[in-house]
Amino acid sequence: MLNVGLTGGIGAGKSEVARLLVSFGAVLIDSDRISREVVAPGTEGLAAVVAEFGPGVLTSEGALDRPALGAIVFADQERLKALNAIVHPLVRRRSEELQRAAGADAIVVHDVPLLTENGLAPLYDLVVVVDVAPGTQVDRLVRQRGMTEEEAGARMAAQATREERLAVADLVIHNDGPLDALEPQVRAVWQTLTERAAGAPAEDTTG
């Protein structure tokens, strides 16, 4: 089994990279998806979030009101740390369960947005970073997600810097360009991963 960490800043296009890797044969463990599962209605995670942040972070149906919670935690680093202290151990436990369920010869890609921030790079055989310029991130968040520039800046400021992410990268995928420029890069990275999994010398695709 080859364990690969996949990360990138908000708006970098990491989800599209993950989708392509799955199409090539990777087993995906998506931390974002798991983080939603562990705070679904009726879970211990949601109960802990409400205990920490109050009932104002719930919708009228009893689900987590993500915009309300986001407005709290992305404006206050200490509140963000409190949320992460609840959610991250639950995500880690579920991720380990899914990893154990993958086949022994699988290439398991862990989509982890906060891999750099939480010092998780040593947990993986290789780390793949999807890299974009900060200006590209802001543009995508405003155009595609309807954020203001201020909201986009706050989300980006709550994450690692571009330089910090690149410092932990073994492989880099550059995604400032059009979508059709992404697939050849991801295919090259997949070739590197399959060679590494097979124990063959892997070509450097970080350029």
Image (cartoon, rainbow, N blue to C red):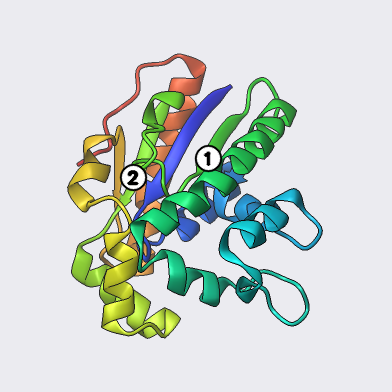
The tag on residue 110 is 1
The earlier-in-sequence mark between 2 and 1 is: 1
- The reply to whether callout 2 and callout 1 are in contact (CB within 8 Å) is no
Q: In the image, is 143 to the left or to the right of 87?
A: left
Q: Residue 98's spot in the image, x, y percent?
A: 70, 35
Give how far across and how far down residue 182 sits, in percent.
Answer: 36, 58
Q: Amino acid at mark 2?
A: Val
Any part of residue 76 in sight? yes
Element under label 2?
Answer: strand
Q: Which mark is residue 129?
A: 2
Q: Residues within 10 Å of mark 2 (few under 14, many from 20)?
A: many
Residue sitting at the far top: 199
Residue kind at label 1, given as amino acid type? His
Q: Quadrant of the C terminus?
A: top left
Please determine whether, in this image, residue 178 is positioned above or below residue 139. above
The residue depicted at 35 percent of the width and 23 percent of the height is 202
Q: Is residue 188 above or below residue 62?
A: above
Q: Residue furthest right?
A: 42
Query: Position of 204 compared to 3: left or right?
Result: left
Label placed on residue 30: none
Q: Is residue 52 left or right of residue 147?
A: right
Give how far apart the Cα atoms at labels 2 and 1 are: 12 Å
Residue in the image at 64% along x and 41% along y: 90
